[in-house]
Amino acid sequence: MISANDLSPAELAALLHFHADAGVDWLLEEEPVDRFAEFEAMKLARQGARTSQPRIDTPSQAPASAARAQTERRPAERQPAPSASPQSRNAPAIPDDQAIEQARFAAESARSLSELKTALEAFNGCNLKNSARSTVFATGDLESRIMVIGPMPGADDDREGIPFAGKAGQMLDRMLGAIGLNRQQIMLTNVIAWRPPGNRAPSVPEMEICRPFIDRQIALAEPKVLLLLGNFTARFFFGGNDTILGVRGQWRDVWISGTKIPAMASLHPQELLTAPINKRLAWNDLLAFKSRVRTEFPG
C-alpha cells in the first residue's frame, strides 16, 4: 500500500482532487470515535465467550450458559455506534411533493435577492444540500439585467462558494472578455444551488424542488436577456430532449412569472475545455449574444 508520505506534493494534490471530484468531501466523521477502545472491547468479548462456553451444555446448564453469553456481549453492545453521516443525519423526512410546496412558499416569500439567498440557505428540503459544502448563490452585478445561468455547482464552485470557479470559470472569463464583458458587470448563477455528489445529474424531484428558487431569482433580477450554458440548463428552461448542439445559438422565449424573457443557449465552458474544437461554435453564439445585448442596452 502506498503511504501519503511516499507521494510528492503534486501527486498528493492530484489524489485529493481526484477524491473531491468523485464526491468525497469529508475525510473525518462529525463526532470522534475511539476505534482502538471499540476494537479492544470487541476482542475481549470474543475471548470471554470462548473461555466461558462449555463444550456440551446439559439441559440444566443451557440457561446459565445463555445468560453468561448475553452478559459477555453487553460491553461490545454498549460501545457507541459510528456517527451518522451528514446526509443521513440531515436528510429531509418529508415527501417530495411537500418539499416542492415548501420551496415554493420560501421562494415566493422573498421580496429581494438578499432575502431569497437567506431563504435558500435556510431551506433543508433538498437532499443535495446534505452532501454539499456550500449553497452557491448568484454573484456579480445583481442589477445588471444581463444573466448567465449554468447547470449546477462543480467541485471548484462548491469549495469556493461561487458559481463558475476554477478552470471552467477562467474559460468563462475569457469568453466574456472576448465580447467586452466581465463577471463583475453581469449576474452569474446556476439552476441548482448545491453540488450533486460526484457531479451526477440531479433527479427529477430534486430539479422540481430547486425550480422555485431559480424562477424567483430570475423574477427578482428582471433580466432583459438570458445566456443559458450547457445541456442541462437548456433542457431545464426549453424542455424537450434536444442536445445543446441542437439548440445552441437560437433565441427562444422563456416565461418566468408571466414575463417573457429572450434566452439563448450555448456550450458550457467545461465542454469547451473537453472539446476545444467547439470553441468556434461558442464564439458565434457569443457574437449573437453581444449583438442582442447592444440592442437591449443601447449606448
Image: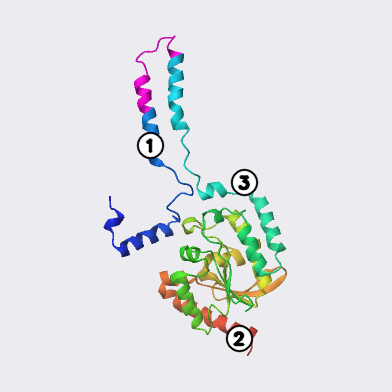
Residue under numbered circle 1 = 39
Locate residue 113: give its quadrant. bottom right
Locate residue 141: give its quadrant. bottom right
Mark in the foreground, 3 or 2: 3
Q: Is residue 241 magenta?
A: no
Q: CA distance from mark 3 to mark 2?
A: 49 Å
Q: Which residues are magenta?
A: 46-62
Using residue 166 as the reference point, say whether residue 14 is left or right of it. left
Amino acid carrying mark 3 in the image: Ala
Using residue 119 as the reference point, say whether residue 273 is left or right of it. left
Q: Note whether 209 is above or below 151 in the view shown.
A: above
Judge by depth and name the residue closer to the eye, 22 or 239. 22
Residue under numbered circle 2 = 294
Q: Position of residue 104 (x, y in %)?
A: 69, 59
Camera sees residue 271: no
Residue under numbered circle 3 = 93
Q: Note whether 286 is above or below 96 in the view shown.
A: below
Q: Earlier in the sequence, mark 3 or mark 1?
A: 1
Amino acid carrying mark 2 in the image: Arg
Mark in the foreground, 3 or 1: 1
Amino acid carrying mark 1 in the image: Phe
Residue shown at the point (41%, 75%) measured from the top left: 277
Residue shown at the point (65%, 53%) measured from the top left: 99
Camera sees residue 78: yes
Q: CA distance from mark 3 to mark 1?
A: 33 Å
Q: Secondary structure at mark 2?
A: helix
Do callouts 1 and 2 mark residues in contact (Cβ within 8 Å)? Answer: no
Do callouts 3 and 1 mark residues in contact (Cβ within 8 Å)? Answer: no
Residue shown at the point (50%, 48%) measured from the top left: 85
